[in-house]
Amino acid sequence: MKDQYDVIVIGAGPGGSSAAKAAAEKGLSVLMIEKRQEIGDPVRCAEGVSKVWLRKHIEPDHRWICADVKGSRIFSPDGSMIEMAEEIAGGEVGYVLERKIFDRALACESAKAGADVMVKTRATGLIIEDHFVRGVKLMHLGEEREIRSKVVIGADGVESKVGRWAGIDTSLKPKDIETCAQFLMSGTGIDQNYCYFYLGNEIAPSGYIWVFPKGQGLANVGIGILGSKSGKKHAIDYLKEFVAKKFPDAKVLEIDVGGVPVSGSIDKTIANGLMLVGDAARQSDPITGGGIINAMEAGKMAGEVAFEAISKNDVSTATLGLYEKKWRQKIGMDIDNSLIVKDIFTGFTDKEIDSLAHSLEGVNFSSMSLLDLLYALFKANKKLLWDLRVLFKNVVKYELDFER
C-alpha cells in the first residue's frame, strides 16, 4: 500500500470493484479498501440479478451461479398467483448468485486490472483541503494511516459515512429504508426454476417476502419491510412466522440481517474530488431493494469519469458532474419511477392488492413490456391506479425517446 494513488475506492462490493476495475483499466493507480476481513461476507441481499444486465459487466461463471431461473411467481394475500417470465420479472430475476464468491470474483477482476486491494482496512475520515477531498484516513490492522489521492469513490453501502464526511446529505428517514432479514434454508421443497414473492400487510407490511432458489435443495428465504413499519415486531419476527407456516420442516443454515435504502435518488452524489456509488448513493431500486446491477453500472461510470477528470487535472464538481449526468440518464429514471410505485403500493390494503392480482388473471406475461403491464392494470383498475398516471406518462416518454 503506497502513500499516494490516483483513486481510492472505499468498499469492495459490486459497485466498488466495478469502479476500481474501470479506473485501473484506464491506467490509473487505484487502491480499494474493505473494512471486513472477507469480501462478500456477510450477504445482505436475495442474490438475484438479471442475466442480460449482468453479462454486460462480466461473463457468467458456474462457480458463483447457484440457480438459473426462468421466471417469478408472485402471490397476493389471498394466494392468487401471477407468473412472469424472467424477461419482465424485474432486475432481480435471472441468475441467483453466491455473493460470497461473486463479490470476490469482481474484486479479483479489479486486482487483475492493476488495483491494489486491502481488506480489514476501515476508512476513519477524509483528507479535506481547500474544500477538496484529497485522500482517506484509514485504520489497517490497528495502524492509522493517511493515503492521499486525486479522487475518492465512496462505495461503502447503506451505512455510508463517506458522503456525510464530504458534506453530502445521505440521511434516510424510516420510510426510506427497508429493514431486512434472510435465512438460508434447506428442505423448502420449492421449484428451483422460479423466484417467489409473497405480498401482504399481515406477513410483510409495506414490503414483501422472497424465496429464491440456491440449488441443491437450498433457498434464500427473506423479508424486507419499511423501517416506518418496524416497531415492536421486527422483520425477523415476521419472517419466523412465515417460515413456521410455509416451511415447517425446513432447516435454517444461516441468518443475515441488514438494511437497504429505498429512498429514490438523492440530490447530489458528488463533491470536489469525490463520487458515491451503489447503496452509498442510494441507487438501489425503491420497490425491490435490489441494487447489484445499478451499483455495477454506476461504479463503471465513476471509474471512467475519474480517469477523464484526472486527465484534465480537474476533479472539481464541474468535471465530476459528468458522472452525475451519466448515472441519472442510465438508471436514474428507473429509480425515480420505482419510487412512485413504491409510495403508492405501500398504501394499498390487502384487499386492493388482491384486486390487482385478480385483474391480471388470464393475462399472457410471456411477451409483455412494462408499458403493456401498466396498460393492463389501468384498463382493469382505472380508479385504483389513477395515482400511477405520472409513472405511465414517464414510461411512455422514455420508450418514445428510446425509439428515437
Image (cartoon, helix red, strand yellow):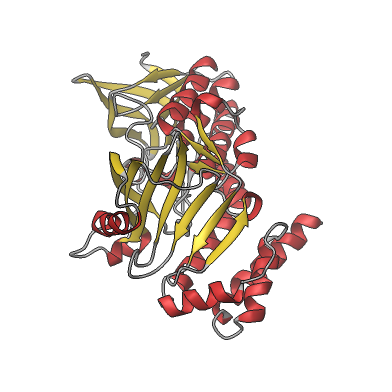
Image quadrant in which you'd find residue 16: top left
At horizontal 46% and vertical 52% (from top left) the residue drawn is 268
Q: Residue 99 versus residue 152: which sits nearer the camera? A: 99
**Screen quadrant of the C terminus:** bottom right
**Screen quadrant of the N terminus:** top left
- For this orientation, the residue located farthest to the bottom is 383
Residue 6 visible? The answer is yes
Picture coordinates of residue 298 (x, y %)? 54, 41
Picture coordinates of residue 382 (x, y %)? 61, 84
Q: Residue 38 versus residue 48: which sits nearer the camera? A: 48
Q: Is 230 rendered above or below residue 69?
A: below
Q: Residue 4 versus residue 366: which sits nearer the camera? A: 366
Picture coordinates of residue 274 (x, y %)? 44, 38
At horizontal 28% and vertical 46% (from top left) the residue drawn is 257
In the picture, measured across the screen, residue 362 lies left or right of residue 10, that is: right
- For this orientation, the residue located farthest to the right is 404
In the picture, measured across the screen, residue 350 lies left or right of residue 67, that is: left
| Image label count | 0
Q: Is 379 rendered above or below residue 28?
A: below
Residue 286 visible? The answer is no
At horizontal 17% and vertical 64% (from top left) the residue drawn is 232
In the picture, measured across the screen, residue 234 lies left or right of residue 314, that is: left
Q: Is 58 rendered above or below residue 156?
A: above
Picture coordinates of residue 161 (x, y %)? 31, 42
At horizontal 60% and vertical 69% (from top left) the residue drawn is 391
Q: Residue 309 versus residue 228: which sits nearer the camera? A: 228
